[in-house]
Amino acid sequence: MPAENIFITWRHKMKTEIGDILKHSFEVFKNHFKDILGYSLEILKIFILLMK
């Protein structure tokens, strides 16, 4: 098996693995986004109350 075939296979494998990781990260982020947004709004409210 020539070296360039190994490289192409490896590169393809890396691309799919990175793609899977990104897809997974995006799903997790999407699921937690609402929670994060909620916490941020709560913190903002507390900040505003403290500033008054």
Image (spheres, grey):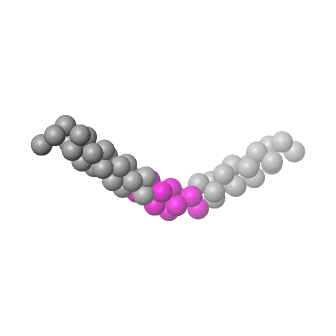
| Relative image position of residue 36 (x, y in whole percent) | 59, 54
Q: Quadrant of residue 39?
A: bottom right
Instruction: Locate residue 36 relative to residue 42 in the image: left or right.
Output: left
Q: Is residue 17 visible?
A: no
Asked if the stretch drawn in magenta spans residue 33, the answer is yes
Which residue is nearer to you in this view: 52 or 44? 44
Residue at image point 63% right, 57% down: 37
Residue at image point 23% right, 40% down: 4
| Relative image position of residue 21 (x, y in whole percent) | 38, 51
Residue at image point 75% right, 52% down: 45
Asked if the stretch drawn in magenta spans residue 4, the answer is no
- Magenta region, residue range: 24-35
Residue at the right extreme, as displayed: 52
Instruction: Locate residue 48 relative to residue 18 in the image: left or right.
Output: right
Instruction: Locate residue 48 relative to residue 20 in the image: left or right.
Output: right
| Relative image position of residue 30 (x, y in whole percent) | 52, 61
Which residue is nearer to you in this view: 15 or 36? 15
Which residue is nearer to you in this view: 31 or 23? 23
Q: Is the residue 35 above or below the residue 51 in the image?
A: below
Secondary structure mainly formed by the magenta segment = helix
